[in-house]
Image (cartoon, rainbow, N blue to C red):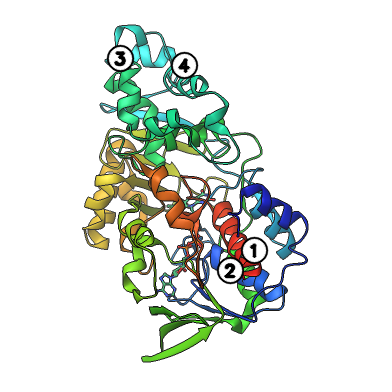
Amino acid sequence: MPALTPADLRRHLGDDLRGLRPPRTALVVGAGLAGLAAAHELHRAGCEVTVLEAADRPGGRARTLRRPFADGLHVEAGAMTVTPECHYVTHYRERLGVGLDRSDLLDQDFSYFVDGKFVRPDADSLGTAGLPLAEHERGLGVPELIARYVTAAADELGADLTAPHWAPSAALEELDRSSVDEVLRARGASQTAIDLMEPMFLEMRGGDLLSASALSWLRHESGYRSLLTSTDGWGKIDGGTDELPRAFAHELRDRIRYRAPVVRLDQDDDSATVTYLDHGRLARASADRVVVTVPFSAIRHIDVSHARLTEAKIEAMRKLRYASIVRVYLQVREQFWKGHNVSVSTDLPIRWVRDATANQPGPRRILEVLMTGWRARALAAMTEEERVRFVLDHVETMFPGAHDRFELGLSVAWDHEPWIEGSYVLPERGHSRLMPAIRAPENRIHFAGEHTSFEPNGGSMNYALESGVRACVELATAS
Ligand SMILES: Cc1cc2nc3c(=O)[nH]c(=O)nc-3n(C[C@H](O)[C@H](O)[C@H](O)COP(=O)(O)OP(=O)(O)OC[C@H]3O[C@@H](n4cnc5c(N)ncnc54)[C@H](O)[C@@H]3O)c2cc1C
């Protein structure tokens, strides 16, 4: 069977996946968006499908937090933004009757808080703040620094970098062996310039400029999901991101079994078998095909020693790295800072603070702090109470009055979230070599999920949904 391309899948989707002949039975492991899309399409095509989900809810990393917040306020623990190019999100949103709203990230009032002072990203404000930029960077604002160090680097690589079908040339593979830090420094960026630019790209994507693949980064920054290329069309799922997985789950009903973690996978020439927990007992189920959507960060909970997997797959499972992200939310009884929809990148250890509910009704607000990389891992090692206290104390130095207005706090440390244990793929140097093995089917066992995306930076609902459709097409075209 020839390998499927993104264009093949868009054709199948445009054709409403008609004419595909799925296997008689299939099992899907995981009810995140990838598993839900695969199960949805398999069911529509007449396959007898069962989804086994370890958690007690659908959606995985598409997760909205509503409790214990007051006044109906809600925040996102995981996925938040949808762009007009997210064709799969649009397709399923429309089919399932889920609405779209304007993204809160669009009208943000962005600033830095450096050395105890607020600084704007424009050249005048940077100049007045007297930040130690290099001689050749003086007089530039952050947009100009980005144009010089990021956009120019991407432009030099030409069309190869942004080709719709990801197949890096030899020159690009060489870049894949370099880190983001190496590329920025080779172009003359000072540490101060890097610190100012970072929130626009890697800070949000998981940090680690020293190990992240320069190629994967530049491809991401040239694409439609980058803050650098954001357009007015950016949106969010109306009412909270979890409305999308909930709509899928409502439709699939009792074809999804919750609290049913899969602990072992087997296959022989005729079928594939999963062993899972069912109310404290071990249960087994067999089917013609199995689709595994479990992130590789949590795959070690499944025994695959009898699954007949190739060495390349086992290596990919072991090597794939995930970004560490912690989000902490502080509910305050009223706004006590200046400006609407503020978003502040800081040199304090908390790194990034924003008003996460600026466009929600009522006097209360939820301030969100997002930390990545080693700082996120440090925070993850604290107790819940310590995390909230740590963040609140630092927010107080930036926005005095935080302690007085504070009502309650909550955090999500993605490295510690059961059955996920990471936020999303963080492509390290040499990532392009791992990619084919991550996605490849292994006889009767198929793989979906954001990490199996055609793009090195999977990390999106769109790619998770696309991978579910890809797995469904694979099943229907396998002999
Ligand atoms: C902090 C953060 C911010 C993000 N921001 C955005 C954004 O703005 N826009 C965007 O589009 N995307 C964003 N994403 C990415 C997006 O959320 C994911 O790419 C997508 O939701 C992944 O879907 P999935 O189905 O591949 O995996 P998951 O959602 O992780 O689903 C996997 C499922 O498998 C289950 N599972 C695991 N192990 C087992 C087992 N042994 N047995 C049974 N079930 C198991 C898990 O419980 C889970 O439900 C963000 C993610 C994070 C973490």
Q: How far apart in space, not on screen, are marks 2 and 1 (Cα)? A: 14 Å
Judged from this view, the residue extending furthest toward the bottom is 281
Residue 400 higher or lower than 115, as above or below: below
Label 2 sits on residue: 36
Label 4 sits on residue: 144
Categorize mark 3 by other alpha carbons within 10 Å: few (<14), some (14-19), many (20+).
Answer: some
Nearer-N-terminus badge (1/4): 4
Nearer-N-terminus badge (4/3): 3
Categorize mark 2 by other alpha carbons within 10 Å: few (<14), some (14-19), many (20+).
Answer: many
Which quarter of the rendered picture does the N terminus lie within?
bottom right
Q: Position of residue 404 (x, y in %)?
A: 32, 49
Q: Is residue 204 visible?
A: yes
Q: Nearer the viewer, residue 151 or 102?
A: 151
Mark 2 or mark 1, whichever is nearer to me: 1
Label 1 sits on residue: 473
Compared across the picture, whether 52 is left or right of 469 comes to left
Compared across the picture, whether 383 is left or right of 399 comes to left
Q: Circle 4 sits in a helix, a strand or a loop, which is it?
A: helix
